[in-house]
Image (cartoon, rainbow, N blue to C red):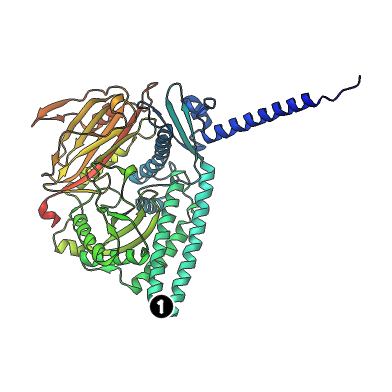
Amino acid sequence: MKTVFDPFKFYQNKLIMKKLIFLFISAFIFSSQSGFLNAQTPAWVKYERRTAMFPNNSYIMGFSSEINYYDTDVNELIARCEENAKNELTESVKVSIKSITVSGIISSNTGIDQETLEYVKQSSVSFSNLDIAGLTTQHWYNKKKKIAYAITYVKRIDAIKFYKQKIVNDIKDLEAKKQFSEDMLKADMQQKAIQSYFECLTIFREVEEAQSILVALGKSDEISLKKDKTIQLKSVVDLAINKLNNTTKKSISDVAFFIANGLKMQSKKLEGKVKLSSFNYQDTKMGSPFSKRLNMALEQKLVSVTNLNIHDQNYATQYKSQSLIDYIITGTYWDDNDYLKIIVVLRDFKSGKAVASIETKLAKSFCENNNINFLPENFIVANTKRKNFLEDEIVGGDLNLEVWTNKGTDNLLYTEGDTLNLYLRVNKACYIRFIYYLADGSQVLLLDDYYIGVDKVNKVYQLPEEFVCAEPFGAEVLLVNAQTEKFEPLNTKEQYGYKFITDDLDDIIRKTRGFKKLKEGVMKAENSIVITTMSDFEAW
């Protein structure tokens, strides 16, 4: 049969085809731009499927979900969920590091020898904010139920490969900078030489961070960490810096000037607001009268020596996510035979990336001769309690709990007469238990089964009590737990208008954290803050 060409029908079919192609492309573009806003429900939204897809032995993963109670902009809600998911992932890595270094577990359980344990213990506290590389993030919004979901993950094998290579690359950079410094010395250009040596310290901080992450991921062998090579290079750099500018100082004022000058040499073009935090003793998060005096001296030197814009943020109205701070200076000091070894890092506040670093030493005899304590008054008891808190610490889960004070969350020092205000925020309706562990061993129940309803979700709650710093002084802990069901009751007695807990510490932890295996549908979260209190006399 002969086919007759019909121009009209051909044109009509062509238009239909174009329309179909246009609709397909439009739908594809819309779905790509909106992420998973209208796609089929991802399998990872369900807990059982999520744990099957991302098993803990193969992935590190963070997850968050949030109900849109207030008709918040969907993109804003999703961004918050993504941030919470990332925070959960990084916190799990940090807790893994802490559980190894604080407990001191060695041998077959972790594959870490004592030397590596001590090395990681010192290096892991130089960073406060991890930025894990290679993360994949996905989100989905259920329009019908008004719930946003986010997941972020990375394969352990990929993360291990990345950080092993980063250590190799950083060591190459260190060797190049060391060679440049030596060349500058031969050319009689000492200023450029010492500046380059100082810049090596910043790279060492990056190496230490990568090594700590590898340990958290189960890699502690020499081939992975390159610990011996790092120590050898560090020794050469330290000797060179000490030869050019004696790093052992005779007074707190000398230490402060050396730190300020070292940071200045590495951050001449730095613009933005900088917060100076108080220094902690080793990895304890505890300060001391020495910390206070060093902080005061360093603030004065930073103002007079550097061009850094030192800024003190009001945390009562602004938390980290809305921070006006661009950079932060943190520090730790360590027992080093007859000396205190002081390690200082200047970091980008939001990313946690090291911008500059400096190290120095002070003879302990200076502190002894001037009656300056470098440990909090109740150090032994407080440190034992700290280790108890870190054992089986709650981490992960879909309940997000933020806790902070009017001075922030880290490196907190309060002097006699200072006022302490407490704030918290959660992303889901839940019950709160807030316990204050005082320096004298007392345990005060500030909040118990306090219900935060949907009308208060993602809003700042300030405890009505204001606390004025008074004796007994020393290290204290604020421990906050949140869960979606009521807590097991604690035994208390009323005194001075407060509820003092009569249970021992083990019972408090058991009644607050409960069992490791959660009931179906029950979510838990935990957060703690360490503060150090001291008399006004000790601070001066």
Q: Nearer the viewer, residue 114 or 259?
A: 259
Q: Is residue 232 left or right of residue 126?
A: right
159 is higher (above) or lower (below) than 303: above
474 is higher (above) or lower (below) than 237: above
Tell me what residue is drawn at x 53 percent, y 36 percent.
33
Element assignment for label 1: loop
Residue furthest right as drawn: 1
Can you identify the residue that label 1 sits on? 189
| Percent of width and height locating residue 51 | 49, 29
Q: Is residue 184 left or right of residue 472?
A: right
Binning the other alpha carbons within 10 Å of mark 1 as few (below 14), some (14 to 19) or many (20 upward) gives few
Tell me what residue is drawn at x 22 percent, y 55 percent.
291
Asked which quadrant contains residue 146, the reply is top left
| Percent of width and height locating residue 306 | 29, 65
| Kind of residue at badge 1 | Met
Q: Count how many numbered circles sit on residues in the image.
A: 1
Residue furthest top as drawn: 1
Tell me what residue is drawn at x 11 percent, y 27 percent.
494
| Percent of width and height locating residue 322 | 32, 43
Q: Is residue 47 left or right of residue 516?
A: right
Q: Nearer the viewer, residue 66 or 9?
A: 9
Q: Is residue 447 left or right of residue 20?
A: left
Asked which quadrant contains residue 83, the reply is top left
| Percent of width and height locating residue 424 | 26, 35
Q: Nearer the viewer, residue 533 or 22?
A: 22
Quadrant assignment for the C terminus? bottom left
Q: Is residue 130 visible?
A: yes
Residue furthest left as drawn: 496
Asked which quadrant contains residue 302, the reply is bottom left
